[in-house]
Each structure stands twice: as structure tokens, then as C-alpha cells.
Image (spheres, grey):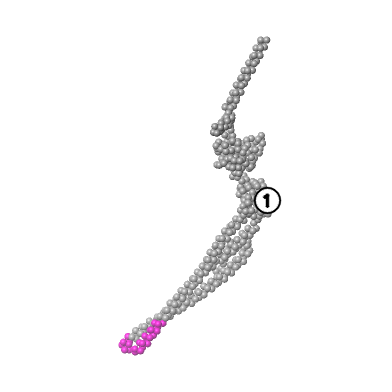
Amino acid sequence: MSNLVKKQKLTSRSYIELGIVGMILIVSIVTFVLFGVELDSAAIAKGRVNVEGNRKLIEHLEGGIVDNVLIKEGQKVNAGDQLIQLSANSIQTQVTQLEFRLLSIQAQRERLESERGNRDTLNFSDALKNKVEQYPNLIGILETQKLLFLSRSELHNSEQAVLKARFQRVESQEAMLVQQIETKQKAYELLLQEFRMHDRLLEKGHSSRLKAIELKRKLNTISGDLIRIKGQKKDTHLSKLEVSQQQSANRNRFITEVEKELQDLNRVVEELSEELSRVKEILSRTSIRSPYSGKILGLKVFSKGDVISPGETLMQIVPEDGRMVIKANLHPDYIDEVVPGQKSMVRLLSYNPRSVPMIEGEVVHIGADRLESSDLSSGELSGYEIKVVLNADEIAAHPQIGLYPGMPAEVYITLRKRTPFEYLIEPISIGLMRSMKR
């Protein structure tokens, strides 16, 4: 009986000791967990996969009527590939008309340049003649310019010929007067010698005074003739100068008219060239081409005959060479704890978490200011936009992962480490602090 009692006492004591040890062990474990274990804290930011540089809008400046759609939604295109062809009939007609007007003016310019150079014939340039096959009506323009060149040249040459004949006639008259002056001058000199000899004979009484008077009268007559002829020669010389000036004035007037016409044509050519460049630029835009390589998204034009309004967005192109980043909305409470270069883990919500693990990433950008809901791509109410780049090696190690623009994602940004006790005491301390403030 006593042994049984002793045995029961030992058993009860063992249970008590075991309970005390268990409690000490539990308290130790809890204390270690609360104060000795450090847990990672993370800021969770919801976001989406985006192409760095954003989608590229394809718009058209003038608008028009669709002639052919060469792509479809989701199709991959290269930079320079044609996407849509607009109707170019009216624009092409304008280009043809402007080019024909410029060719017509070029024919006029070449005719005027030949007139300015006083050429005998009009020879058009090879560049102009080679356009006849493309513009058959140009033949009539060239023939008209040739006829105009001949008529104007004949008129100008006839005017110059009349002035030249007048100049030659005056010049011959001047030569005749010079000969008359020489003849009269010789006759005067001979008669003067005779008069002087007769004057000496008269002094010796070998001649009559009547003869002396006769000789004196003849000298005066010849002297008067010389004066008259020299006056005529001077008038003739002035007439010759006048005719020469008329020739120069006629030629200068013709050249001035030609130069003025050339200047007017050059101004017209400049205006038409600018207009042609503008219209050709519009014509080139009827062939809508992709400025980037990527995939077609949001195509709004589908068939021939669709009308495009000026400035209308036709589609978007997601660049293929753009880096995929996660754009997420960071809660304002964590803005002081997140910095560029900080590590993060990204969960792609479109994939099953059992088959696709979280992917390591790095924060590369933090918005400079808080954005409201209308500015955010993630759909959150407000916060700071951050960009996270995924680890390329991890993406390559999981070929089943495909990144597509717009794919939802969650970003877990690692913050400072804290113990469970700090997690528990923080809201209490914050509450006490607020209470003390009140």
C-alpha cells in the first residue's frame, strides 16, 4: 500500500516537472520567436507589364479614303513596312499638274535664256526633251516656244538691222564729208599760194588789182564751204552716235524685258516648287508605313472605303525592341523606404503560382510626385508610380513565361527586417502616440 502511494506521488511530481519544463520551453521558444527571429517586411504594389517607351500611336495628318489595308490585328511588322494605302488619285493629279506647269515654265526659261544669249537657234535641254514621253502635251509647249523664239528674234533682229543700216548710211555720209573737207582744204591751200604770189606781183606792178580781188573772193568762198562741210560732218557724227545709242538702247531694252520675264518665272518656279514639295509630301503620306518594329494593337481601319479623319489614331504599335518593365502603384506610406536599385519579387498574376515562381526584380524608377487615379495605369486610387525591371536570367530560365503588355502583376519590395514583437508592438505604440497627442 505504501509503495503504491509512493509511486503515485512520483508520477504526479514527474508530470509537474514535465509541465514546468514544457512551459519553460514554450516561453523560451515564443521569446526567441518574438525577439530573436527577424522577418522581412515588404511593400506590395499592384501593377501591369508595360513596354518601356509605351505604345506608339499611328496617326494621319490629312486623313483620306482607305484604298487597301495591308495588316491585321496582332500582326508583327518591321520598321518601314506599309500598313495602309490611302486613295491617291486626287493628290497624284495635283502632282502631275504641278510638274507639267513647271516643265512648261522651264521651256519658257530656256527660250528666254537663248534670247538673252542672242543665239540663232533654240535648242531645248535633254532633261526637258526626255519628259515628252511622260507628258505628251509638252510637245505643243515646246513648239509654241520655238515659234515665239523665232518671231521675237526676227522682230528684234529687224529693228537692229534698220538701226544698223541707218548707222552705215550716216557713217558713209561722214566719210564723204571728210573727203570733201580734204579736197576743199587742198584747193584752199593752192588758191592761197596763188593769192600770195599775185600779191607780190601786184606790188611790183606786174598784175592788176582786179585779179587780186577775184582771188580773194574765191578764197572766201572756199573757206565758207569748209566751214559748212565741217558743220555737216559734226552733225553727221552726232547722228552716228545717236544711232549707235539707239542700237544699244534697243538691245538693252530687249535684254531687260527678258531678264524681267526670267525673274517673274523664277518667282513662279519657287512658289510652284514649294507647292509641289508639299503635295508630294502629302502623296507620300498616302502610303502609311510603320516607323517602328513591333506588333499591331487596336487597329481601327479594316476595309477599303473607310474614311480617316485628319489626326485620327489608326492603330498602336507595341515596339518589339522595347524593354518589358512592371509599372506599379506604390502606396504613399512606403515612399520613404523604397529607393532605386532596391530588390523586389514579382508575381505574375496571369500564371499559376504553383508552376511559375516569383521572379526577382529591381526598382529602377520612382515617380517624382504622387499620381491620382486618372494618371495611374494600375487602377489604384493614388500613389507613386514605380518601374521594376525583371531579372533577365530568371526569365530565360523559365521558357514558359511570356511577358505581354497589360499583364497584371504584384510587386513585393523588400523593406527593413523586423522581429515579430516589433510587428505586434508597432500598432500599439502608434495608437498610444496618437492618444497622447489628443
View extreme (top): residue: 2
Give the residue at x 59% y 59%: 276
Q: Is residue 79 above or below residue 383?
A: below
Q: Quadrant of the N terminus?
A: top right
Q: Which sits in the foreground, 214 or 93?
A: 93
Magenta segment includes 216: yes
User: Splitting the image into 4 quarters, where does residue 33 fall?
Assistant: top right
Q: How many marks?
A: 1
Q: Position of residue 436 (x, y in %)?
A: 54, 32
Give the residue at x 49% y 71%: 249
The residue segment tinted magenta is 200-225
Q: Position of residue 130 (x, y in %)?
A: 60, 62
Q: Position of residue 414 (x, y in %)?
A: 58, 34
Label 1: which secondary element: loop
Q: Is residue 329 above or below residue 13?
A: below
Residue named by callout 1: 302
User: Splitting the image into 4 quarters, where does residue 420 fall?
Assistant: top right
Residue 274 shows in the view: yes
User: Splitting the image into 4 quarters, where does residue 270 fall?
Assistant: bottom right
Q: Is residue 347 above or below residue 200?
A: above
Q: Position of residue 142 (x, y in %)?
A: 60, 66
Q: Main secondary structure of the magenta part?
A: helix
